[in-house]
Structure formats: structure tokens, C-alpha cells
Image: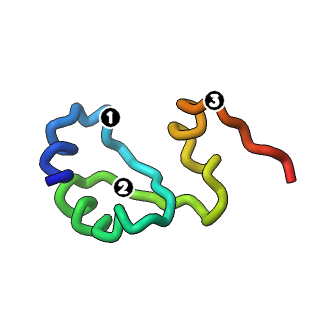
């Protein structure tokens, strides 16, 4: 289970997580309950709000 693996991490690595609005996090409340990790969701079509994803891929927000 994802919660069990997450609990094996050092606390410094599990303060919060940010996801898009996909179905993969439909049970986010259970994960938060089991791990005390706060889960946030990015606004639709605003992938730059997920900083790790964009920093990893070396992408930047394009001004509107």
C-alpha cells in the first residue's frame, strides 16, 4: 500500500505532496489519515503549481 511505503520515508521528505486532479489520488483522505502528510491539488491546466514536476523537467511557466 502507498501509505506504508510513504511511512518508511524520513519525515524530512514527507511534509506535503501536490498532485494534479487525476483519479490516482481519489483516496487522498485515507493517505493523509495514515501518514499525516498534507496533500494539495494544483488548479486544472496549471501544472507549474506542481514545482517538483516542473523543476525536474526544466519547464517554466509561459506568461499568458
Graded by Cα atoms within 10 Å as few (under 14), some (14 to 19) or many (20 or more), the crowding at tag 3 reads: few
Report the residue at 17% width, 58% height from top.
34
Secondary element at image label 3: loop
Q: Report if the CB atoms under discs 1 and 2 are less than 8 Å apart.
A: no
Is 47 displayed left or right of 11 in the figure?
Answer: right
Specify which label sits upstream in the sequence, 1 or 2.
1
Task: Give the residue at mark 2.
Answer: 38
Secondary element at image label 2: strand
Q: Residue furthest right?
A: 64
Task: Give the residue at mark 3.
Answer: 58
Report the residue at 21% width, 35% height from top.
9
Q: Position of residue 54 (x, y in %)?
A: 59, 38
Q: Position of residue 10 (x, y in %)?
A: 22, 32
Task: Give the residue at mark 1.
Answer: 13
Real-space CA distance between mark 3 and mark 1, rounded to the nearest whole angstrom: 21 Å
Q: Report if the CB atoms under discs 3 and 2 are less than 8 Å apart.
A: no
- The picture quadrant where one finds residue 33 is bottom left
Report the residue at 21% width, 44% height from top.
6
Q: Quadrant of the C terminus?
A: bottom right
Judging from the image, the colouring scheme is rainbow
Amino acid at each position: 500500500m502507498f501509505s506504508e511505503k510513504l511511512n518508511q520515508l524520513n519525515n524530512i521528505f514527507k511534509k506535503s505532496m501536490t498532485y494534479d486532479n487525476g483519479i490516482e489520488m481519489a483516496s487522498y483522505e485515507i493517505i493523509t489519515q495514515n501518514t499525516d502528510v498534507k496533500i494539495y491539488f494544483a488548479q486544472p491546466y496549471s501544472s507549474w503549481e506542481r514545482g517538483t514536476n516542473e523543476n525536474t523537467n526544466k519547464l517554466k511557466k509561459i506568461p499568458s
